Image: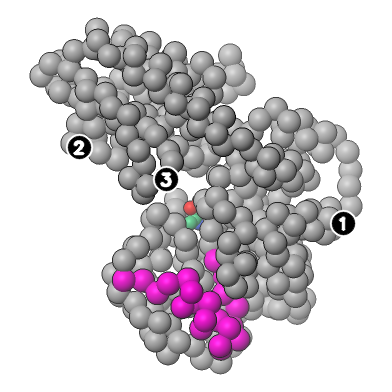
Amino acid sequence: MNSYQELGLQKIVNASGRMTALGVSTVNEETARAMCAASMSFVAISDLIDAAGKVIASHVGSEDACPTAGAAAGIAIATAACIAKNSVSITQQLPCSDGLANEVIIQKGHCINFGAPVTQMIRLGGGKVVEVGETNHTLAQNISDAVTEKTAALIYVKSHHCVQKGMVSLEEMIAISKKMNIPLIVDAAAEEDLKTYIARGATLVIYSGAKAIEGPTSGFIAGKKELIASCKLQYFGIGRSMKIGKEGIMGLLKALDLYEAKDMIAIRKKEMEKLQYIQQQLAGIEGLKIELVKDSAGREIYRLKVTVDPEKAKLNCSKLIEGLEAGDVSIRIRDHFSNLGIIEIDPRPLLDGDEVLIAEKFKELLS
Ligand SMILES: *Cc1c(COP(=O)(O)O)cnc(C)c1O
């Protein structure tokens, strides 16, 4: 029994992905131990933030870094830093930024909702959002024409949620940032490559600690040291309402360490074994077609695609999903294509033994 079950909650088998609604990711034992140890001692927090910033910066290849409660907090704090710079008074006055250089330029196709709107996080940091271009079409000149003496920053969102075609590229955004001497913030919350954005010329880059890095609920901003100093200053302003604790910081550092040393070949092999087990177990079930498919974005990620024939299976796809989710053990699968009678099993978030629970539940519902 896990600790959530003791509260009377369902045991979740996550076969869908890194979802905030399911707790994003799980940490391994070493990271959990680092968090546990950190939670049992006092520490001078500003010294911890400085020391952690140095460690994070060494992973990212940036001048400095600042831990945050998450990537969403990172967007608000980075925005506030670009407006307040080194002013304590402005830091204490935000998010009210009337009369200051407070405009943050974003292309319309990047105004996404990751669970909350990116633009709201900008406003939370005192930014006035300037949306540029059309949803499916923005030119570099639309961005540079929007720059005025009121501009505080440009922001570029790297995400599968964004419109991908017809957008101003990261390279073009970097060129405008450098030419006009305006900071460029990159929201790379779920990205796997920690070094590329700073190496290519972003001023600040933001990551989530719980997504690709599989750390605790946390995040960070990395980049130029003057602006990172201002990010840290925001903990005496709006950042206070989104503070990260000492446990979160120490867990993040441990997770970053382990992330660098990760044996992806061994991990992918184990994932494949789980998928093959489920595939074998479900092979005989009437009305299911089961295929191993590669990620549609071309990444080296495989998933199990299950196509339901409602006549033969005597259950349609939405009833199957309902059944999988119900009960003491709740199986959560990818349902993006459920309207076509297709569901997918993502092996990456599965814990050991989950593959057996998935196979059992399918058999229970369909035999
Ligand atoms: C997940 C996500 C966020 C928010 O990250 P948290 O760490 O949950 O705050 C922000 N931006 C993008 C693009 C995301 O995918």
Classify 10 Å Cα crowding around label 2: few (below 14), some (14-19), many (20 and above).
few
> Ligand 1 near label 2 (Cβ, under 8 Å)?
no
* Residue lying at 34% horizontally and 63% vertically, measured from the top left: 163
User: Magenta residues, as a range?
Assistant: 166-186
State yes or no: discs 3 and 1 in contact (Cβ < 8 Å): no
Classify 10 Å Cα crowding around label 1: few (below 14), some (14-19), many (20 and above).
few
Q: Which mark is residue 6?
A: none
Residue 290 picture quarter: top left
Quadrant showing the C terminus: top left
SS state under label 3: loop
Can you say whether 21 is above or below 48 in the image? above
- Residue 272 visible? The answer is yes
Residue beneath label 1, please? 47
SS state under label 1: helix
In the image, is residue 119 part of the stretch drawn in magenta? no
> Ligand 1 near label 3 (Cβ, under 8 Å)?
no
Q: Position of residue 64 (x, y in %)?
A: 75, 65
Residue beneath label 2, please? 339
Q: Position of residue 84 (x, y in %)?
A: 68, 78
Towards the viewer: 165 or 245: 165
Report, in whole angstroms, how far the alpha carbon at label 2 lies from the one at label 1: 52 Å
Q: Earlier in the sequence, mark 3 or mark 2?
A: 3
Q: Is residue 193 left or right of residue 49?
A: left
Report, in whole angstroms, how far the alpha carbon at label 3 lies from the one at label 2: 24 Å
Q: Position of residue 332 (x, y in %)?
A: 39, 28
Q: Which mark is residue 299?
A: 3
**Foreground tag (3 vs 2):** 3
**Foreground tag (3 vs 1):** 3
SS state under label 2: helix
Towards the viewer: 27 or 195: 195
Classify 10 Å Cα crowding around label 3: few (below 14), some (14-19), many (20 and above).
few
Q: Earlier in the sequence, mark 3 or mark 1?
A: 1
